Image (cartoon, coloured by chain):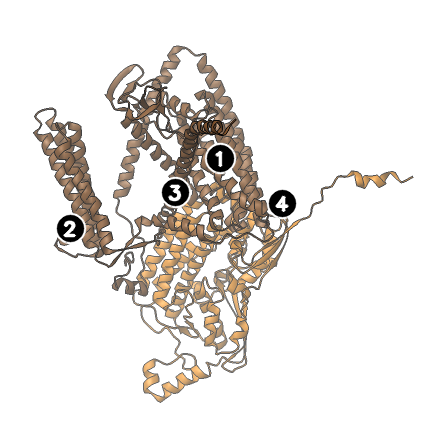
Chain colours: A brown, B orange
């Protein structure tokens, strides 16, 4: 082989391999970046949520100071651009105003209007009147009145639109252009008002305390990386990676959304600029598709079990390598706990796998789209899986490997800096990934009731009640958002548990794992098997009745979501309760000096 | 030929095992920074434990012998820093016993009200910290919020949140402030509603109950022989409370119950404290009702109480009286006395010896915590290492009081 041949050979190989390498790099970047960001966000949410429950101030100290003009520009310029875009869209982008356009524009405008006014009124109430406009707003007794007014306006605009029906377009035009005007004024006015209020020379940017986890992350990178004198240097350094990596890559098998179908080019490649406008309800496009999933493995959830098992090694190694008795006990506890709960974790899913007939997460979601959510067919399995997943993430009430008051910090006692942060973030990522996996397996993944690949279809059994076609892109987008919202809901559930429950003792934990969860999961498998066999041999009438029942669960879900929405709105609209009764002398002085907001004398 | 049984020892396979020595504390989260436990562990079980106290020893008793009797108050403040008002009152009562004087009714009720508020703060801290160390962080912060309300009230009354030094021999440093009754009633109501919320969160929780019930049991006989007093003794089933057994400061006029446990485990200690909080709240309400709105707070005895400032600045008699009490100290008659009251953790005794000069000859404090901590070894031996947390928490060891 001479030099030229070698070069050609190399080039051919390089060009063949390069796309794969790029693809791999992209996937790793997407998965790792996504879940690490989620972990940071969840850290923030956790702190905020905890502080809210416990009636104290959350993490809010990290601040970036900006010169006045930069801050003003940062508030006003994007608003100006957005406002300009809205006006340009209304002027040039629309020929014939449809009902949907009028609806969206008017509702968005009303929402922006009341929301802006509410925030400004709240600010006026807190810091006092500064200008005539403030005086006007201060007459509003309570900023919550803005919300009620806003809701009334929403309903009114909707009624006007519905009342006009499909008749002459004047009403639609009025709503659309009026909405554009209101939207423009509220965006520009709100941003302008905010910019005008920035009178100090330096404006602090806090972003609701979001900078705090960022600052924590930066800090941990620059902190001293302390390794105990007699520690096993190699294993001590390796352990955080082994603990961190599996939690990070588990997310790879979870689909965030439905498969995107594109038109194919002549050579069979995907033309990513041409999304199919409409796809049929059944069937998955095979030729030019992009799955919203990092990798579609045929071993599916087995991959999750395999990797979740690897995490133990990290914790156990960290405990062993630190040369500290507390760490060692923490490592032992971690190993014992995770091995025990791994068994339950695997066995609870067997029932689900029997029903879905697949181990691939993607296909599991498709089964749930066609039938019903997994939580209805495997309720016990969900509860058991949830408990085991919380135990796997080593958070309260299963945080005995860390056991702050007993083992100081358990297996990562001797870690500092970014190595510690890797254990810490690993736990948060485990919360996110386990939530995402539970959503995919038990809560229908990206599915929301009555929404299918071709649009909204409301049917019970064979009788179709309602059908509304929607474009493919929109359906996938809504599904993606639904997946995110469901995952956040499960994360919040885990956070609530973390802030309310005490922790188990080691023997109680083992008892729970081996004597409660394991027999229950075995019983679940048995019961599922019996039911599956019985249904296989049952007649068509039973099966059609089951299909009908599945359709009714969707109705049930919609009703439940509506109830929850109403309850949440009612909760948010309740006047906040100030519990502080006694203001001490120093607090009174501080209040007189304009210092504190909450020291109200209520005795 | 060797005898047959010589090989028997070799045939038994024994894993070489030795207990692990674990040094817990003094700088350990569950030891509150002031106790060191050297534990011999077999797995997670504690086989043997050696409890070592004294890491917060500051020589208070010796320091008391340097100043006047009134200058002892700051020291007793710092003994039990969680409920300093009770220590103040206890020391003042012991001195008054030696002097043979009794404070006016207004002062007695004021002392009862403040003392019971301090007891509520003590219980909130102890039970809250116990929940927090078991991992339930939210109830702890709720209870600390309640304690904060009480401390706000104390700040308003005494000028200090924690170490008030508010007691005086023969009275209190100041009369109650104008709004004291209203604020105290509101505070007690708020605290009770917080405690109800905490109970809803904790007492229905299986994990919490499992961690406490049947953990760290102490029998009635053991508790008595260890010299325990206070909530720990009552949780073991002995209804001994100094306020009922030997009433002082007009406690005989109040209606209240003594909660008593049956098992003497951590759960009983937790619950006895919670119930005592309710009883204390009721005592505070009764005391506020009984307390007259005006009238003298201090005894009318020129040997004991400082003259009012107008007299000090305007009359020679006042100046001299002030000078004598400040420079020489008020003179307790020569003799010995043991004054004892019910403090946050049990019977807090002051054994005072006076030689008739203005300086204490000996101030011996009988701290309830010291004796309670002495029982820690018996409580946690044989339990698991995780049980140290609720056991130690429920004994409510206060370093300042135990080590002095």
Q: Chain of mark 1?
A: A
For residue A12, what is the image quadrant?
A: top left
Q: Is residue A348 visible?
A: no
Q: Which numbered circle lies on residue B43?
A: 4
**Residue drawn where x is 47% and y is 48% of the image:** A418
Q: Which mark is residue A142?
A: none
Q: Estimate how packed mark 4 is, as few (under 14), some (14 to 19) or many (20 or more) residues with alpha carbons within 10 Å.
A: few
Q: Nearer the viewer, residue A158 or B145?
A: A158
- Tell which subunit mark 3 falls on: A
Q: Are marks 4 and 3 on the same chain?
A: no
- The CA span between labels 1 and 2 is 52 Å
**Cα–Cα span, label 2 and label 3:** 36 Å
In this view of the protein, can residue A422 be seen by the observer? Answer: yes
In this rendering, position of residue A133 left or right of residue B53: left
**Marks 4 and 3 in Cβ contact (< 8 Å):** no
Q: Give x and y (percent) for residue A194.
A: 20, 51
Question: Label 2: which residue?
Answer: A137
Confirm or deny contact between disc 2 and disc 4 (CB under 8 A): no
| Same chain for the residues under marks 1 and 2 in the image | yes
Q: Which mark is residue A42?
A: 3
Identify the element where label 4 is drawn. Answer: loop
| Residue B233 x/y as whole percent | 54, 56
Mark 2: which secondary structure? Answer: helix
Circle 3 or circle 1, nearest the eye: 3
Residue highlighted by disc 1? A388
Residue drawn 37% across and 64% down? B154
Say which element carries label 3. Answer: helix
């Amino acid at each position: 082989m001479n030099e030229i041949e070698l070069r050609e050979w190399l080039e051919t190989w390089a060009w063949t391999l390069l796309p794969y390498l790029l693809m791999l790099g992209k996937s790793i970047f997407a998965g790792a970046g996504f879940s690490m960001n989620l972990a940071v966000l969840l850290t923030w949410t956790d702190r905020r949520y905890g502080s809210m429950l416990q009636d104290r101030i959350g993490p809010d100290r990290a601040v970036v100071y900006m010169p006045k003009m930069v801050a003003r520009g940062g508030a006003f310029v994007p608003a100006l651009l957005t406002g300009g875009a809205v006006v340009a869209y209304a002027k040039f982008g629309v020929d014939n105003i449809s009902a949907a356009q009028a609806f969206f524009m008017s509702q968005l405008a009303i929402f922006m209007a009341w929301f802006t006014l509410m925030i400004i009124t709240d600010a006026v109430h807190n810091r006092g009147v500064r200008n005539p406009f403030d005086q006007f707003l201060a007459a509003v007794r309570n900023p919550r009145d803005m919300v009620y007014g806003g809701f009334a306006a929403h309903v009114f605009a909707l009624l006007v639109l519905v009342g006009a029906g499909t008749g002459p377009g004047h009403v639609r035009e009025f709503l659309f252009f009026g909405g554009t005007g209101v939207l423009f004024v509220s965006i520009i006015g709100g941003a302008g008002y905010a910019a005008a209020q920035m009178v100090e020379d330096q404006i602090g940017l806090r972003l609701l305390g979001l900078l705090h986890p960022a600052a924590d992350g930066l800090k941990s990178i620059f902190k001293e990386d302390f390794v105990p004198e007699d520690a096993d240097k190699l294993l001590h350094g390796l352990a955080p990676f082994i603990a961190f990596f599996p939690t990070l890559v588990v997310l790879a098998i979870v689909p965030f959304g439905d498969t995107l179908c594109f038109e194919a080019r002549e050579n069979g490649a995907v033309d990513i600029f041409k999304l199919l406008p409409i796809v049929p309800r059944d069937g998955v496009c095979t030729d030019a598709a992009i799955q919203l999933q990092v990798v579609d493995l045929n071993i599916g959830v087995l991959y999750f079990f395999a990797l979740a098992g690897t995490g133990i090694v990290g914790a156990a190694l960290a405990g062993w390598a630190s040369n500290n008795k507390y760490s060692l006990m923490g490592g032992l506890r971690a190993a014992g706990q995770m091995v025990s709960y791994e068994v339950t974790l695997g066995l609870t899913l067997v029932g689900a796998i029997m029903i879905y007939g697949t181990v691939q997460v993607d296909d599991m979601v498709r089964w749930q789209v066609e039938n019903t959510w997994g939580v209805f067919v495997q309720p016990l399995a969900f509860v058991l899986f949830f408990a085991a997943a919380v135990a796997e993430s080593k958070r309260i009430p299963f945080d005995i490997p860390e056991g702050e008051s007993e083992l100081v910090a358990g297996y990562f006692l001797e870690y500092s800096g970014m190595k510690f942060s890797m254990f810490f973030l690993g736990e948060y990522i485990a919360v996110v990934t386990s939530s995402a996996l539970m959503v995919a397996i038990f809560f229908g993944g990206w599915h929301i009731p009555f929404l299918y690949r071709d649009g909204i279809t409301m049917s019970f059994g064979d009788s179709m009640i309602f059908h509304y076609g929607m474009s493919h892109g929109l359906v996938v987008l809504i599904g993606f958002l639904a997946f995110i919202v469901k995952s956040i809901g499960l994360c919040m559930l885990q956070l609530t548990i973390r802030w309310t429950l005490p922790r188990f003792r080691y023997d109680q934990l083992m008892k729970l794992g081996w004597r409660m969860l394991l027999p229950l999961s075995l019983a679940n498998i048995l019961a599922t098997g019996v039911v599956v066999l019985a249904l296989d041999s049952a007649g068509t009438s039973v099966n059609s009745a089951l299909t009908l029942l599945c359709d009714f669960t969707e109705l049930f879900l919609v009703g439940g979501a509506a109830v929850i929405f109403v309850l949440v709105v009612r909760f948010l609209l309740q006047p906040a309760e100030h519990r502080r009764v006694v203001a001490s002398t120093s607090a009174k002085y501080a209040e007189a000096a304009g210092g504190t907001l909450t020291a109200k004398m209520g005795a | 030929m060797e005898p047959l049984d010589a090989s028997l020892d070799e045939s038994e396979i024994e894993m070489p095992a030795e207990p692990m020595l674990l040094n817990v504390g003094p700088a350990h989260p569950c030891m509150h920074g002031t106790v060191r436990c050297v534990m011999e562990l077999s797995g997670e079980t504690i086989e043997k434990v050696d409890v070592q106290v004294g890491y917060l020893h500051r020589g208070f008793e010796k320091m008391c012998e340097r100043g006047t009797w009134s200058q002892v108050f700051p020291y007793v403040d710092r003994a039990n820093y969680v409920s300093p008002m009770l220590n103040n009152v206890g020391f003042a009562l012991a001195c008054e016993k030696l002097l043979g004087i009794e404070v006016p009714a207004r002062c007695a009720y004021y002392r009862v009200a403040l003392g019971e508020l301090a007891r509520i703060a003590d219980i909130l801290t102890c039970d809250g910290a116990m929940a927090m160390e078991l991992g339930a962080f939210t109830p702890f912060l709720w209870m600390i919020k309640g304690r904060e309300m009480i401390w706000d009230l104390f700040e308003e009354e005494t000028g200090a949140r924690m170490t008030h030094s508010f007691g005086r021999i023969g009275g209190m440093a100041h009369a109650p402030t104008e709004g004291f009754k209203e604020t105290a009633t509101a505070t007690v109501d708020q605290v009770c509603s917080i405690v109800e919320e905490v109970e809803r969160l904790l007492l229905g929780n299986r994990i919490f109950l499992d961690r406490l019930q049947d953990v760290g049991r102490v029998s009635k006989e053991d508790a008595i022989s260890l010299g325990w007093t206070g909530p720990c003794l009552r949780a073991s089933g002995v209804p001994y409370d100094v306020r009922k057994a030997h009433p002082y400061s007009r406690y005989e006029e109040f209606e209240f119950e003594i909660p008593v446990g049956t098992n003497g485990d951590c759960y009983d200690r937790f619950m006895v404290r919670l119930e005592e909080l309710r009883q204390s709240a009721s005592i505070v309400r009764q005391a506020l009702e009984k307390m007259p709105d005006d009238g003298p707070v201090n005894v009318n005895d020129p040997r004991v109480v400082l003259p009012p400032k107008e007299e000090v600045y305007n009359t020679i008699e006042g100046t001299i009286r002030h000078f004598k009490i400040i420079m020489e100290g008020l003179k307790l008659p020569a003799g010995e006395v043991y004054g004892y009251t019910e403090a946050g953790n049990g019977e807090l005794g002051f054994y005072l010896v006076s030689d008739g000069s203005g300086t204490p000859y000996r101030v011996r404090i009988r701290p309830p915590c010291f004796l309670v901590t002495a029982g820690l070894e018996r409580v946690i031996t044989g339990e698991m290492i995780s049980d140290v947390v609720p056991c130690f928490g429920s004994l409510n060891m206060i370093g300042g009081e135990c080590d002095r």
